[in-house]
Amino acid sequence: MSRLTPSSRAARARRAVAGVCLGFFFGSAVAADATFTVRILTPETALKAAQAALKKCRDSGYQAAVAVVDRMGVAQVMLRDRFAGPHTPDMAAAKAYTAVSFRTNTSQLAEATQAGRPQSGIRNRPGVAAVGGGLMIEAGGSLLGAIGVSGAPGGKEDDACAAAGIAAIREDIEL
């Protein structure tokens, strides 16, 4: 049986500590890559945005529906004014879903997907609404969700209502 000298014990201890440290740091790096942290709107924040968008539409004389979806396109809030058309809730939800799904505001998507353009096939996807009125909700470089409005006389007016909804929560969602 061999005896360890004090210097060889110290060398072994240093190697062991170095091995544990390397394992910890490399293990942490692997674990960090295995998950991803996201920010999601609270239901209260989504409701606040929808209410502000609906108020903007009402103040402008429009009966509309407003939908807010999370970053995955799942509905969080749906509001429909009492005289808004029966199609407006579905259309508002489709606009919000489209904005978050394609990570672009729907007015820009409407332009990019015109007939004869390379992206025109996007319009044939189920649930896609390539018309104005869907805006992404972003803060701190993250996509948090989207808001869709339907019922104003055109896409620009729907966009203005949606923008008012985002403006109402801007302070709440910024880092």
Image (tube, grey):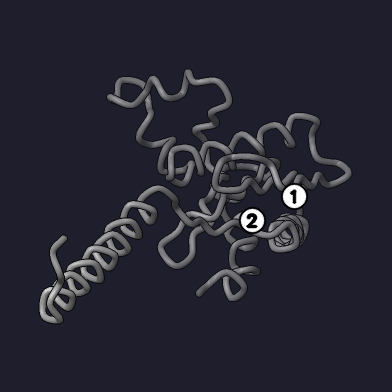
Q: Is residue 5 left or right of residue 105?
A: left
Q: Position of residue 173 (x, y in %)?
A: 57, 69
Look at 51% across and 51% down and name the residue there. Answer: 136
Q: Which residue is mark 2?
A: 161
Q: Which residue is mark 1?
A: 62
Q: Is residue 160 above or below residue 104?
A: below
Q: Position of residue 53 (x, y in %)?
A: 69, 57
What is the number of callouts on the image?
A: 2
The answer for how far apart the CA atoms under marks 1 and 2 are is 10 Å
Q: Is residue 140 left or right of residue 63?
A: left
Look at 52% across and 36% down and name the residue there. Answer: 98
Q: Residue furthest bottom?
A: 6
Q: Is residue 158 visible?
A: no
Look at 69% across and 57% down and name the residue there. Answer: 46
Q: Camera-side residue: 76 or 58? A: 76
Quarter that holds the N terminus: bottom left
Secondary structure at numbered mark 2: helix
Secondary structure at numbered mark 1: loop
Dot 2 amino acid type: Cys
Q: Is residue 131 visible?
A: yes
Q: Is residue 167 left or right of residue 143?
A: right
Q: Are marks 1 and 2 in contact (CB under 8 Å)?
A: yes
Q: Is residue 158 above or below residue 43?
A: above
Q: Is residue 116 left or right of residue 131?
A: left
Q: Residue furthest front?
A: 1
Q: Is residue 164 above or below residue 31?
A: below
